[in-house]
């Protein structure tokens, strides 16, 4: 072998080895928070002492770190304020409300002191981001201690976090503390808080909150001093706390955020499930709440049963449904939801936010980059959970055979509006709130639904569960879910990801006609691809006697095909090369015995024009 050939071969081997090593050596940063919070309910302000032990598991040396200072967004002329006042379809919860905040109504985080291992750091506040230059670099594999003293003011309730929401809840404390930004294989994620989603480091939280003794707190983590707190937290038992304040001590292992809420009028109830998980419910009693909140525990207990069986087992021993916030927002071990709702609405928002415990709180995707993996996967599962609850008679409404079909029609109609955008766009950078909402919730759900169509129901379900079990307590990205589905199915699916995530192209397949075949008792179906995205094509042939014969035409780039689903078997036809606009499907069926031929009779494919999907012999006349 010549020198050049040897050098080339060595480089190829080295490159391939590097790829394999990169896949095998997944890493993620680790953090431990210890916070002591002193809260003044009269001023709506608090002081904080925060100690972070940060472990750099990356192969990189870090010379600086970043923190999120979320409360700084709630100030006139902030990025969130200007974005809300200039986007053409502003969120009504925000609108121009930030612009009108008075000094005692704004939110802020003020950092008084920040040290690294006892040495002063140099830092700059860039609105909602704290930029910190470190006196000592953090080497790969090393840990460092970051200590901070800060002051904060809770803004009036506008978006997610705040005080005195429209239902009278005193404090909804989300995105409330200086939070270390995530560093991963893509580098730092120090995104300004403009109104969208989040990304956090896996870690352990110990949080001590001292507050007026009349306030009851619920939130993330396990309360460590129940007997000391007593009172309403323990359903009426007396506590041992004395003085004007109480200190709640919470511990939350292996989470990537910490939320809490407080109100002097909270009613607190619990339900202990058969598996030992304790469900907590915090709400203000009243005509608009009490009846439905009393029914909620039993329904959510049944929801947990179904979710654990179908999507993976909930890994914590606590979950809290807390009245608060401005709609519904998910956090580790709990959610903030507005509570003055009909029972169906209350259950619906509770189920959706609970499902986020699977597709964000345990599978911690970067929501800013992949909001559709968070909201979309949650929406997909939530639709099935709600359908199950209807089937069991636990909520009003009739169960349906397929709870995802309406999303297909709704999304196609939205596409016709011209507002659809690529899923790959950062959550903050969509042109409209509508495009973000439909993209992340609906199109994200349809990402899974299209995979179900491609793989078959049983293979998809097994792959979806495998995805959870493979990537829990990590930060999966779009390629990770595709790779799991590839391993489960034996197919290649990268083409689907490229089209569906990075473009707005969609399929449109048509049955052009059918004729007698050249051989006896055969027929030939002429199909055409009028769309811009290739997909495998399912064809249902209905016989004169009403029997159905199923065919599936795989794409050559799939390197495989579904064989059966739902007890039905497919005849696997020869591949359809994606470059070919037409295809002829040969049937071992006499032409005279055909009543109709239909592309995608299940209605699952995102076919933009279904008017050309069906053919009957009379169409040849």
Image (cartoon, helix red, strand yellow):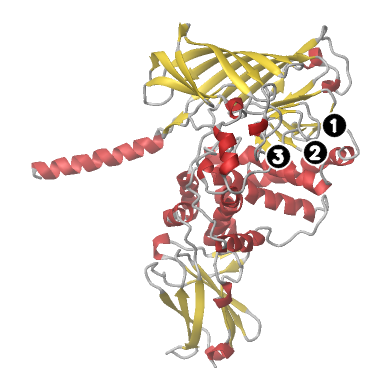
Q: Secondary structure at mark 2?
A: loop
Instruction: Provide residue 453's location: percent of width, then percent of height.
Output: 55, 61
Query: Does residue 82 appear to the left or right of 46 in the view shown?
Result: left
Instruction: Provide residue 198's location: percent of width, then percent of height.
Output: 56, 34
Q: Quadrant of residue 599?
A: bottom right
The residue at which mark 1 appears reads as: 284
At horizontal 52% and vertical 47% (from top left) the residue drawn is: 430
Decide which of 349, 15 is in the foreground and name it: 349
Asked whether disc 2 touches disc 3, contact meaning CB atoms under 8 Å apart, the reply is no
Establish if 474 lies above or below 204. Answer: below
The residue at which mark 3 appears reads as: 328
Q: Secondary structure at mark 3?
A: strand
Badge 1 density bin: few <14, some 14–19, many ≥20, Cα 10 Å = many
Q: Secondary structure at mark 1?
A: strand
N-terminal of the pair, mark 3 or mark 1, is: 1
Badge 3 density bin: few <14, some 14–19, many ≥20, Cα 10 Å = some
Establish if 308 lies above or below 119. Answer: below
The residue at which mark 2 appears reads as: 339
Instruction: Provide residue 14's location: percent of width, then percent of height.
Output: 25, 38
Asked whether disc 3 touches disc 1, contact meaning CB atoms under 8 Å apart, the reply is no
Query: Does residue 143 appear to the left or right of 301 in the view shown?
Result: left
Q: Quadrant of residue 210?
A: top right
Furthest residue to the bottom? 621
N-terminal of the pair, mark 1 or mark 2, is: 1
Label placed on residue 584: none
N-terminal of the pair, mark 2 or mark 3, is: 3
Query: Does residue 336 appear to the left or right of 266 in the view shown?
Result: left
Check the picture and name the quadrant holding the C terminus.
bottom right
Decide which of 534, 130 is in the foreground and name it: 130
Badge 2 density bin: few <14, some 14–19, many ≥20, Cα 10 Å = many
């Amino acid at each position: 072998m010549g020198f050049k050939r040897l050098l080339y071969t060595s480089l190829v081997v080295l490159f391939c080895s590097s790829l394999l090593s990169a896949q095998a050596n997944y890493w993620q940063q680790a953090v431990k928070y210890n916070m002591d919070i002193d809260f003044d309910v009269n001023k709506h302000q608090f002081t904080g002492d925060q100690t972070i032990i940060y472990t750099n598991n990356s192969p990189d040396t870090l010379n600086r770190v970043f923190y999120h200072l979320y409360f700084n967004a709630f100030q006139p002329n902030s990025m969130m304020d200007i974005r809300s006042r200039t986007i053409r379809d502003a969120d009504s919860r925000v609108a121009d409300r930030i612009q009108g905040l008075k000094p005692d109504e704004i939110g802020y985080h003020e950092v008084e002191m920040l040290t690294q291992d006892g040495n002063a750091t140099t830092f700059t506040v860039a609105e909602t981001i704290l930029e910190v230059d470190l006196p000592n670099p953090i080497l790969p594999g090393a840990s460092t201690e970051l200590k901070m003293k800060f002051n904060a003011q809770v803004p009036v309730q506008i978006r997610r976090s705040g005080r005195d929401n429209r239902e009278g809840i005193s404090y909804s404390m989300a995105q409330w503390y200086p939070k270390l930004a995530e560093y991963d294989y893509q580098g730092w994620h120090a995104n300004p808080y403009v109104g969208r989603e989040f990304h956090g480091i896996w870690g352990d939280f110990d949080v001590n909150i001292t507050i007026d003794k009349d306030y009851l707190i619920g939130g993330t983590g396990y309360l460590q001093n129940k007997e000391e707190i007593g009172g309403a937290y323990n359903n009426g038992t007396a506590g041992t706390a004395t003085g004007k304040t109480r200190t709640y001590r919470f511990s939350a292992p292996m989470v990537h955020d910490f939320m809490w809420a407080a109100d002097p009028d909270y009613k607190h109830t619990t339900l202990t499930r058969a598996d030992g998980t304790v469900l907590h419910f915090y709400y203000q009693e009243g005509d608009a709440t009490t009846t439905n909140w009393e029914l909620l525990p039993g329904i959510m207990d049944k929801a947990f049963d179904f979710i654990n069986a179908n999507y993976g087992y909930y890994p914590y021993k606590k979950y809290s449904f807390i009245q608060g916030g401005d709609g519904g927002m998910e956090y580790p071990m709990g959610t903030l939801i507005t509570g003055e709702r009909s029972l169906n609405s209350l259950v619906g928002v509770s189920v959706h936010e609970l499902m986020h415990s699977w597709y964000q709180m345990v599978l911690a995707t970067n929501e800013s980059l992949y909001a559709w993996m968070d909201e979309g996967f949650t929406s997909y599962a939530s639709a099935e959970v709600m359908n199950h609850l209807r089937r069991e008679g636990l909520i009003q409404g009739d169960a349906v055979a397929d709870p995802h079909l309406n999303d297909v029609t709704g999304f196609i109609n939205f596409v016709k509006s011209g507002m659809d955008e690529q899923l790959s766009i950062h959550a903050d950078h969509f042109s409209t709130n509508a495009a973000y909402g439909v993209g992340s919730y609906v199109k994200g759900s349809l990402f899974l639904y299209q995979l179900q169509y491609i793989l078959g129901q049983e293979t998809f379900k097994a792959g979806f569960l495998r995805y959870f079990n493979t990537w829990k307590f990590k930060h999966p990205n779009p390629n990770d879910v595709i790779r799991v589905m590839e391993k489960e199915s034996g197919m290649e699916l990268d083409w689907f990801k490229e089209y569906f995530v990075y473009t707005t192209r969609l399929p449109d397949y048509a049955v052009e006609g059918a004729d007698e075949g050249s051989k006896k008792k055969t027929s030939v179906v002429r199909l055409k691809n009028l769309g811009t995205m290739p997909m495998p094509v399912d064809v249902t042939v209905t016989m004169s006697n009403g029997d159905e014969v199923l065919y599936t035409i795989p794409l050559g780039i799939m390197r495989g095909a579904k064989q059966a689903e739902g007890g039905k078997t497919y005849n696997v036809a020869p591949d359809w090369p994606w470059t070919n606009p037409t295809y002829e499907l040969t049937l071992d069926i006499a032409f005279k015995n055909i009543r109709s031929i239909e592309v995608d009779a299940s209605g699952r494919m995102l076919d933009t024009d279904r008017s050309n999907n069906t053919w009957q012999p009379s169409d040849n006349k």
